[in-house]
Image: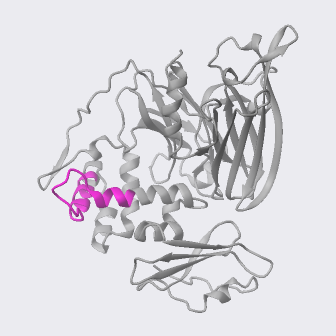
């Protein structure tokens, strides 16, 4: 177990991809932070911020017949540059109660806030040795949930889930369950089981039939299903417009590495689909990594094995994502495809024709395009998936902007953003306005040839301005 602390060095590198971590002497104090958001009501969400502290790293001083360690935790919630809330508290640990030096103290802070982008800053300082400290900041994308469309909360990965009892910490209880988070999303030896919690919304309004099907599985970072973890499929009767799903995934045979856990919901006709996913790290030093044995799909002398290891849900999604670059005839073909193998073969041919470097083992254009889709879904999702929004479409087609000007709403006008691209057509702009006040920005003007053009777009910022219906069609 002495090697456990050394593992955290590698783990912090992994966490840096999604969580910015900084602080002095961070090798002495560690704090893991994560979050998930759930629907609270029509206008607000619950955002749960989870954190874990490690008392074995704190300085213990004599305290009666025992020794006591304390840290001061300071938490600040920001929206933009505005401080929404700030609080501080102490966490104590007696030496006699520290049976396992690797035991963490878990807690969560729950906010009920309107949709928007927020930032959490957490500082941890040893009360007995103020030089020992660390700080962590976490960007929170609190997107609005659709009102009628089938949708899911974030997928919360947990250390344990069980029926709540009188001894359960009240803050850890929801829907009759005691849900203990795992903010570091670190599993494997000695925690070979992932527990997960997810909420489903709009079942009766957003799905056909009397039943729904859940499907959860593990993939690598490229979306390929992995060996050693069984895929689970369950069919449930619809008993209301909202449901809670919990489950466990045994990863004891999964090699060490970073993976995705996917959770999807469909109706019996597979016409309606919603999915969510969470990234986690697995540490199983005794499990040997095996090379995949799947047979590749071959087209035009080039190997495309990726589709053979993708779930049907992922195939369907990729067919949707390519609508922005598919020709009209290709879209007609997509609508006519019924067989899964035919859909795979179509995608093989679709990307083969757009491969900028056929001699290389990877299609760089496909990789870049789907990376932009993933970014759009992560950052722009709200009432619709991120790739379907105007932000998402522009980002997918043209990439990240050179500069973004963000102007918040005021009593005099609506919020808007101007994205500038210095590398397109000598420099172009895209103007987006939030007409609803719920972070649903719409493209109203662009200087890029072929995009919507409205040189009087500033009139749309006036709060009393009423837009004509069906203002655009593209």
Q: Who is closer to the viewer here, 46 or 99?
A: 99
Q: Nearer the viewer, residue 90 or 337?
A: 90
For residue 416, what is the image quadrant?
A: bottom right
Position of 422 with respect to 226 (left or right) is right
The count of marks equals: 0
Is residue 179 visible in the rendered image? The answer is yes
Residue name at image x 55 percent, y 58 percent: 379
455 vs 378: above or below = below
Residue 373 place in picture, x, y as percent: 44, 59
| Image spot of residue 1 (x, y percent) | 53, 15
Horizontally, residue 75 falls left or right of residue 366, namely: right
- At 49% from the left and 84% from the top, the residue drawn is 452
Q: Residue furthest left?
A: 301
Q: Quadrant of residue 423?
A: bottom left
Q: Which residues are magenta?
A: 344-370
* Left/right of residue 300 with respect to residue 430 in the rendered view: left
Check residue 351 for magenta coloring. Answer: yes
Going by the picture, which residue comes out furthest to the top?
65
Q: Is residue 15 depicted above or below 68 in this figure? A: below
Q: Position of residue 461 (x, y in %)?
A: 69, 83
- Location of the C terminus by quadrant is bottom left
Q: As rendered, which of 166 and 364 lies closer to the eye?
A: 364
Q: Report x, y in % for residue 264.
A: 50, 43
């Amino acid at each position: 177990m002495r090697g456990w602390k050394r593992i955290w060095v590698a783990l912090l590198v992994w966490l840096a991809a999604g969580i910015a971590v900084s602080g002095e002497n961070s090798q002495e104090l560690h704090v893991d932070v994560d979050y998930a958001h759930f629907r609270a009501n029509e206008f607000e969400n619950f955002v749960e911020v989870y954190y874990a502290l490690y008392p074995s790293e704190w300085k213990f001083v004599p305290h009666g017949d025992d020794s006591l360690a304390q840290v001061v935790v300071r938490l600040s919630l920001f929206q933009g540059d505005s401080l929404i809330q700030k609080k501080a508290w102490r966490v104590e640990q007696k030496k006699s109660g520290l049976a396992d030096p690797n035991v963490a103290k878990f807690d969560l802070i729950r906010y009920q806030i309107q949709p928007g982008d927020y930032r959490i800053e957490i500082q941890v300082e040893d009360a007995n040795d103020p030089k020992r400290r660390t700080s962590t900041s976490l960007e929170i994308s609190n997107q609005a949930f659709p009102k009628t469309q089938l949708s899911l909360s974030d997928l919360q990965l947990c250390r344990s889930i069980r029926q709540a009892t009188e001894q359960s910490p009240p803050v850890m209880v929801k829907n009759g369950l005691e849900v203990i988070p795992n903010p570091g999303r670190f599993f494997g030896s000695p925690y070979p089981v992932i527990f997960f919690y997810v909420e489903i919304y709009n079942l009766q309004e957003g799905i056909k039939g009397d039943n729904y099907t859940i499907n959860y599985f593990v993939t690598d970072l490229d979306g390929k299903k992995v060996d050693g973890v069984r895929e689970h499929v369950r069919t449930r009767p619809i008993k209301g417009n909202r449901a809670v799903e919990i489950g466990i995934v045994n990863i004891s045979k999964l090699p060490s590495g970073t993976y995705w856990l996917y959770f999807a919901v469909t109706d019996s006709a597979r016409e309606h689909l919603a999915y969510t996913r969470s990234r986690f790290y697995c540490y199983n030093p005794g499990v040997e990594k095996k090379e995949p044995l799947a047979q590749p799909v071959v087209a035009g002398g080039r190997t495309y094995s990726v589709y053979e290891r993708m779930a049907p849900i992922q195939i369907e999604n990729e067919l949707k994502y390519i609508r922005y670059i598919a020709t009209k005839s290709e879209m007609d073909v997509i609508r006519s495809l019924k067989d899964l193998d035919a859909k795979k073969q179509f995608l093989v041919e679709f990307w083969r024709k757009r491969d900028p470097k056929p001699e290389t083992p990877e299609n760089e254009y496909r990789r870049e395009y789907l990376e932009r889709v993933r970014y759009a879904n992560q950052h722009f999702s709200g009432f619709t998936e991120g790739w379907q929004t105007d932000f998402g479409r522009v980002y997918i087609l043209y990439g990240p902007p050179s500069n973004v000007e963000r102007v918040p709403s005021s009593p005099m006008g609506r919020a808007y953003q101007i994205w500038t691209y210095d590398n397109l057509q000598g420099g172009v702009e895209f103007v987006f306005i939030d007409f609803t006040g719920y972070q649903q920005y719409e493209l109203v003007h662009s200087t890029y040839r072929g995009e919507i053009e409205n040189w009087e777009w500033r009139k749309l910022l006036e709060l009393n301005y009423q837009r004509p219906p069906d203002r655009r069609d593209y």
